[in-house]
Amino acid sequence: MSDDDSQQNFILGFVMALIALVIFFVVGIAIWHKGHGNAAAAKPPAVTAMVTTMPAPPPAQPAPKVAEVTETVTVVIPDGASIRVVDGVVNFYFATGSADLAPGAAEALAAVIKGVESGRKAVVSGFHDTTGDAAINEQLAKKRAETVRDVLVGLGVPAAKVDLQKPAVTAGSGNNAEARRVEVKLVD
């Protein structure tokens, strides 16, 4: 009976992750089309991703996860939103003044979800650039971090396993595009 419950939970989680991925993809495409109009025909979006997919299981076993991130993954969307996974740290980059995630959040968070399933916690921290009003930037960084937390919870991670932490220095380093980010790290 416990084995059946485990399989049902896995299948339910898989289906929820797939639904979330489709929703984020559709919303991302709609936002991109709205913001770029005819410019889309002139310049196709640059998308770079390295994802290792798992082989199909033998017939009697449950289906595997869609993808497990094993290397650096970068998804770049023309409006400035992108995702980069390096050494287990997931960085979500945002367009100026936006809290919209780039498509591919579920795949990028696969390693984090796996880490939480093994007993670790996910720490989500929001950063902002140094342009504009500092108070507004801090609120936007918080909203971005909450969006990423909500995606993790939507993908089946218990809310108690996700900590929102305000970094000591909220203004990110590097250029402005790199500074507008949310980091997701695993901690013991």
Image: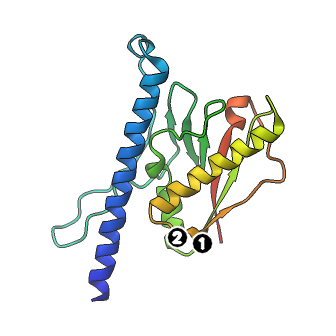
- Whether the residues at callouts 2 and 1 have beta carbons within 8 Å, the answer is yes
Q: Position of residue 123 (x, y in %)?
A: 66, 61
Instruction: Answer with left or right where residue 133 lies relative to residue 6.
Output: right
Crowding around mark 1 (Cα neighbors within 10 Å: few <14, some 14 to 19, many 20+) is: few
- Per the image, the residue denoted by label 1 is 160
Q: Residue at x 42, y 55 (%)?
A: 68
Residue furthest to the bottom in view is 1
Q: Any mark on residue 178, and which?
A: none
Q: Is residue 106 visible?
A: yes
Q: Nearer the viewer, residue 17 or 116?
A: 17
User: Amino acid under label 1?
Assistant: Ala
Quadrant showing the C terminus = bottom right
Work out whether residue 88 can be spotted: no
Q: How crowded is mark 2: few (under 14 residues within 10 Å), some or many (20 or more)?
A: few
Q: Is mark 2 on a helix, strand or loop?
A: loop
SS class of the residue under badge 1? helix
What residue do we see at 61% from left, 31% from top?
A: 95
Residue of label 2: 158
Looking at the image, residue 67 sits to the left or right of residue 101; the answer is left
Of 130 and 37, the residue lying toward us: 37
